Amino acid sequence: MPGIKERLEEVRERIGNAAGRVGRNTEEITLVAVSKTVDASRIGEALQAGVRDFGENYYQEAREKIPLFGEEVRWHFIGALQSNKAKYVAGNFTLIHSVDTVHLAEEISRRAMAKGIVQPVLAEVKLDVVETKHGISEAGLMELVECARGLEGLELLGLMGMPPLTAEPAEARPFFRRLKGMFDLLPEENRRILSMGMSADFEIAIEEGATLVRVGSAIFGPRS
């Protein structure tokens, strides 16, 4: 059974192949290893194998892991975030992927300014029509973008989105294409990171323009 190092080599090869198919440079694409439910020793293995970016979904879990690693690790908050948890997340993560309301943007900015920092964030767009899914609607996106651009404690770097879960990864393509279209309409300074694609569909996301992919099980194995 392949270990973390071997799985990472395979993922990197797949990233390179996907980029090559559409004439892109692999260096344009950041790999975030999703370490939700992954213990510190296995994160350490991935770190030794060259991973520097790790994604966590829950602050309660991340706060136990973050102090165990040095500044070489860049932590990404990729889960749904309630505004009452912004005080814990602002300043503890290199990038917050899941800003989906004006109120949350304002709260993160306020907390960041209180710490004397500027917090980099992405706006999360809702690509799945299921009501329980998080994200700002396409219709409301530009209002959120304009709000974020005016907040001193935020730096909006781009967009994140997740297509509906499907049996066939290829079915995600039109959703990725739609998100890339929204990304292309952003002001240039807010058009630096397009976070889309996970273990099942990151190659398609790269073909459609992703600059950051969030890969968990393809690196760490299936979660229990």
Image: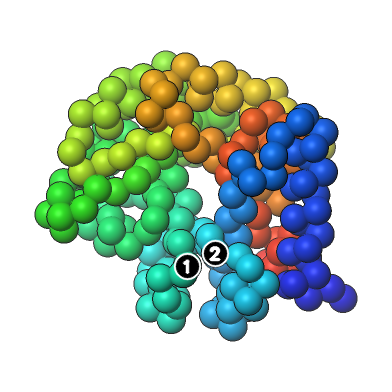
Q: Residue at x 37, y 43 (%)?
A: 121
**Residue found at the very far right of the displayed protein:** 1
- Image coords of residue 93 (percent x, y): 37, 58
User: Which residue is disc 1 drawn over?
Assistant: 73
How far separated are the C-alphas under marks 2 and 1?
Answer: 5 Å
- Image coords of residue 188 (percent x, y): 41, 24
Protein image colouring: rainbow
Q: Is residue 111 left or right of residue 21?
A: left
Q: Residue 165: tell me if it is visible.
A: no
Amino acid type of disc 1? Answer: Val
Quarter of the view holding residue 105: top left
Q: Residue at x 46, y 56 (%)?
A: 76
Q: Residue 49: tell me if it is visible.
A: yes
Which label belongs to residue 52?
2
**Residue found at the very far left of the displayed protein:** 114
The answer to the question of whether label 2 and label 1 lie on touching residues, with beta carbons closer than 8 A, is yes
Residue placed most toward the observer, 192 or 123? 192
